[in-house]
Amino acid sequence: MKKVSNITEVIKLLDENGIRSDGRRLDEMRKIKIEVGVLKNADGSAYIEMGNNKIIVGVYGPKEVRPKHLAIPYKSLIRCRYEMMPFSVSDRKSPSPSRREIELSKAIREALEPAIFTEEFPRTMIEIFIEVLEADGGTRTASINAASVALADAGIPLRDLVTAIAIGKIDGKLALDINGIEDQYGDGDMPIAMMPQLGYVTLFQADGIFTSEEIEKAFEMAKKAIWNIYEIQKKALKSKYLQIVKEVDINE
Amino acid sequence: MSDKYQVISILKKDAILQLLKKNERIDGRGLEDFREIEIFTNIYNKAEGSARVHLGDTKVVAGVKASIGIPFPDTPNVGVQVVNAELIPLASPLFEAGPPGEEDIELSRVVDRGIRSSEMIDNKKLALIPGKKVWMIFIDIYPLDYHGNLMDAFGLAAVSALLTGNLYETEINEDDIILKENKIPIPINHVPIFVTIGKIQNKLIVDPTFEEEMVLDAKITYTIDENNNICGIQKSGTAGFTIDELIMARDIAIEVAAKIRKYLPLKKG
């Protein structure tokens, strides 16, 4: 722990040339890799690497509701569990759910639910399990990017994919897709999720101080990045089926 | 709260929706009006600070307790702030006893972030022996009667209790801390106000009642400081907002926060 306090004195989030601690520009996103259909048991699944974040998502359902009294007569019940594995962070995280994880489970569920045609599946439930294997800032947005792809992979009808990115504030400047250090030592964090085609914002949170103008600027930055991620999500979904086509061709 | 959807009749729901089309609300308010606010402070003597807030029929209490403890290793020179909220069954037939659920935790974490991000408490002044002993400030918030918009009422109660709270004056004698008889106000930098705006179809409404919450598609809470900066945002609910709606809601929130600010108790000291 002593090491951490030493780092704070040395660490510079932004150098003279406007380059961030990991070499990115302010409007530069980390590399994203998404794989679809990575689990056999789950009805839909996805694995995402967004910078150093490594997250796996499994979706089950629509299926019978348990306990039964939770069933909703006119729509599907959406359940979401966001969990960080104890080894996913520097200091071991206790395996019992933290208050942060409970809040994020709700926020992520409410980011995804607007996209799901829940009314098509009354008295059923859809479960979304998110496990963070390695965390480095922006796990909720990476989780949403993977979970919406996993929902699509499960064949659940969606109005649109949900795509997310965080805008942070470092040294008083807005920065796209902040990493762990920038989140810890920066001045603010504003995760945004959207259904890009429909233009709806489904997750919007912030801590730190932002002026009114910064909020508008953050939306502009986020929108651009979200369209890029959206393409990566679609490509990942397609590639699973292209792979199947290939295998079928070989067998014939 | 998961079976909230069961408790409003279709008739009432239709009435709310029909009225909203004409920009009217079921209790006669305008879309951007909040309910009557009453704040009573320093009402419980054992607490370092306390407040009871009435927002229309919604009634909540908040209490501040302070104790001396060890700082977190990554922030050795600042005090500790803990916010806790629990939706107790006293306040509504919808609340059940037991460990705090998603809703309780979200409420307390949004209040916590608003107070923290706005730097309301002058945390550096809470360090007694840097790296070793600091004031720990515990803010506990409870509903007494739930009739909608707990978020804003909780925020107002926490802020009011902090504004009027007192800590013992201390004297530091090497590694010992001596509490003196005299009390001094909790050091305050800024004052955040929480404003929740509900979305029903394409209408935005301030300070939703319980019945309106049943019909809401989604909610957005903005935390606004006295310089009109935004120091906290939380969207909740199972629908989305357009960016234009979010920006409109931000402007409404800034306006409403300025009005609510006038109800705040005077800062001590």
Image (cartoon, coloured by chain):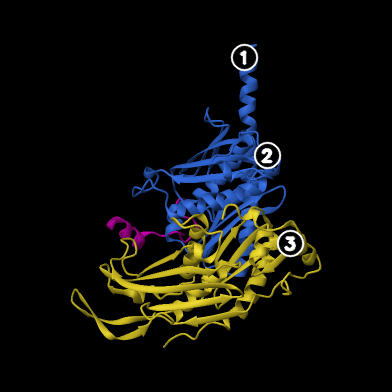
Chain colours: A blue, B yellow
Residue shown at the point (62%, 69%) measured from the top left: A212
Numbered mark located on residue B12 in the image: 3
Q: Position of residue A3 (x, y in %)?
A: 29, 56
B161 on left or right of A221: left
A56 on left or right of B171: right
Compared with residue A198, is residue B85 higher up or lower down, i.e. above or below?
A: below
Which chain is mark 3 on? B
Label 3, residues with CA under 10 Å away: few <14, some 14-19, many ≥20: some
Residue shown at the point (64%, 40%) measured from the top left: A123
Which chain is mark 1 on? A
Question: Which corner quadrant of the image does residue A8 belong to?
Answer: bottom left
Disc 3 residue type (three-letter) = Lys
B231 on left or right of B24: left
Numbered mark located on residue A250 in the image: 1
Disc 1 residue type (three-letter) = Ile
Per the image, the residue denoted by label 2 is: A121
